[in-house]
Amino acid sequence: MTFLDYLALIRRHWIIGIIITALVTASSVLLVTLKNNQPYETTIFLSIGNQQEQSNTTQSIYDDVQAADAFSQTVQGWFKNPQFIEQINAASGIKADISSRQQEKQNVLITYNTTTEDQANTLEKTIQDKLTAEIATYNSKTNDKFALAIFEAITQKKPLSMILFLIIGLFGGLVIASFALYGFEYLFQKASSTNQISEILEKTALDKFKNDHPNADKLTYISAIINKKEGKNIELITLGGDGSKIAKTLTELIPNKKIATINFPQESDKILTSNSCVVLCTLGKTTTNDLLKLKSLLSNSFDLIIIES
């Protein structure tokens, strides 16, 4: 099927297509909205210092840096301790997913998301207080003098382009709708494209009409072709549609021939191979099974017209 065939497919079942597209689009927007229920993102940068009373020598400074680096890994580990996180959540009254990582020596980055900016500020203050208290407890037990040398936080609202997700949802909905509708026609053995009908009947269509509304210029051209056929009788064989409008117009354009409309397969016994045949197939309604049956009854001299329902 070509892209135009898919567009025609959606047009045939436009109500169902709109429903599917609307559901997919709404689901996409709803999912994004739910995922973005905590739009404020906070990043805390903290640096650990060591206040050991040592002589100001190169070796002592190096040892302080090494000790602070090792302790920063300990601080990072606290944020992986569920009990410590639970204490922060309980003290702040905010349930947040707090994560941490070591950026470089002595430095740790802490991140979390909140629903409001006030919650972000409350959680920031609670983390600072809890860290200060936890470091003091650690120092008293180990006789160290670590401290928060730097504690800086920034809170930003994550950008959300609803229009972008709406466009993505619409596009995804159209794609899903086209495949769903094609699956529906395939399941019920409906002919979905002009090429599919032509391949089964091994015949190229003279022309294609939309919604059984015959175009006068096209039918004049077709009637000229049919008028050159031998015999006085023409059988207009319709599959899955109503060819009365085309039959009426052809009758007016070819007054010297008798045109009989036969609905296949209900009136298959009326088909006479001695007469000229014009097969009228309707996309989305004509079944491939009927096409195969009709092919076995026709000679190679028939003509094919296709209608886009």
Image (cartoon, rainbow, N blue to C red):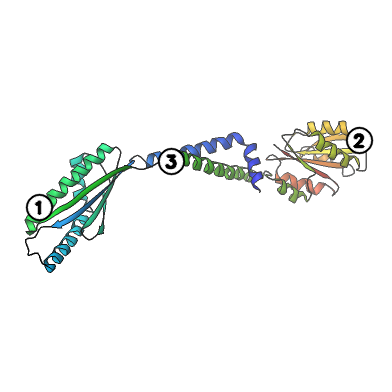
Of labels 3 and 2, earlier in sequence is 3
Near-viewer residue (295 or 38): 38
Q: Is residue 94 visible from the viewing direction of this image?
A: no
Q: Amino acid at mark 3?
A: Ser
Circle 2 residue = 257
In this view, 14 is above or below 198: above
Question: Depth-wise, is mark 3 or mark 1 nearer the camera?
Answer: 3
- Count numbered badges in the picture: 3
Of labels 3 and 1, earlier in sequence is 1
- Left or right placement of residue 283 versus residue 50 in this view: right
Q: Which mark is residue 161?
A: 3
- Left or right placement of residue 168 versus residue 179 in this view: left
Residue 60 % position (x, y): 11, 66
Q: Amino acid at mark 1?
A: Thr
Q: Determine crowd level at label 3: few under 14, some 14-19, many 20+ residues with C-alpha closer than 10 A.
A: few
In this view, 102 is above or below 57: above
Q: Which mark is residue 137?
A: 1
Q: Amino acid at mark 2?
A: Lys
